[in-house]
């Protein structure tokens, strides 16, 4: 068995990321640490977490997030958009915005949008879902896209799990 450092430490009886973000942003899969569990990669602020998942079509991604977390990520403001942008490392990914008319998968009422130039354009009349593509040549932002193209995606989870190490 190999042991790897994942950035969690025990400081004054509180689990914390080595960068100082406290345990409320951690999610242990299964059971508590030390009992055969693993840590899901995530980013977070205000005890919300965003989980990066491999390629799926939009509807399958939405279902996966709803079954395993809460829903596809909703982006409520520019600061959340920047955090997600930094974590995506330039890879296009699905978010929870879709055209029915444009609304968030989780039912949230955020009106924040960060469309790329000339978007949404509903190219070929089949672009009903939203991807973020920060390497797009049309302004590095949101793009309406064909929901049937597999892409990576972020799931949102609002569970707060506190524990002692």
Image (cartoon, helix red, strand yellow):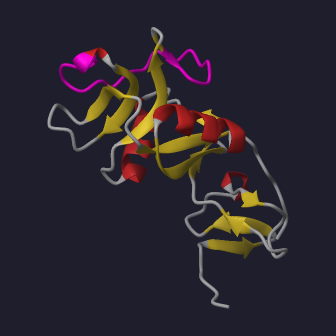
- Where does the magenta region start and end? 103-124
Q: Position of residue 66 (x, y in %)?
A: 67, 35
State the image quarter where residue 128 is shown: top left
Would you say residue 139 is visible in this rendering?
yes
**Is 5 within the magenta?**
no
Q: Position of residue 13 (x, y in %)?
A: 82, 70
Residue at 62% across, 34% down: 71
Q: Is residue 133 left or right of residue 80?
A: left
Relative to 115, residue 63 above or below: below
Dominant secondary structure of the magenta stretch?
loop
Q: Quadrant of the N terminus?
A: bottom right
Q: Quadrant of the C terminus?
A: bottom right
Relative to 73, residue 55 above or below: below
Q: Is residue 71 left or right of residue 143?
A: right
**Is 117 within the magenta?**
yes
Residue at 55% across, 65% down: 19
Relative to 113, residue 37 above or below: below
State the image quarter where residue 142 is shown: top left
């Amino acid at each position: 068995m190999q042991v790897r450092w994942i950035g969690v430490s025990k400081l004054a009886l509180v689990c914390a990321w080595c960068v100082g973000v406290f345990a409320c942003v951690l999610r242990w899969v299964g059971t508590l640490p030390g009992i055969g569990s693993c840590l899901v990669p995530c980013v977070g602020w205000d005890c919300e977490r965003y989980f990066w998942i491999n390629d799926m079509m939009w509807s399958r991604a939405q279902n996966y997030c709803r079954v395993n977390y809460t829903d596809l990520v909703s982006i409520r403001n520019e600061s959340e958009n920047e955090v997600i942008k930094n974590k995506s490392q330039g890879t296009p990914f699905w978010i929870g915005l879709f055209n029915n008319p444009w609304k968030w998968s989780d039912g949230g009422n955020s009106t924040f949008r960060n469309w790329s130039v000339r978007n949404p354009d509903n190219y070929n009349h089949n672009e009903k879902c939203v991807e973020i593509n920060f390497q797009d040549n049309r302004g590095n932002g949101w793009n309406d896209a064909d929901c049937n193209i597999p892409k990576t995606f972020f799931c949102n989870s609002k569970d707060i799990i506190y524990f002692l190490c």
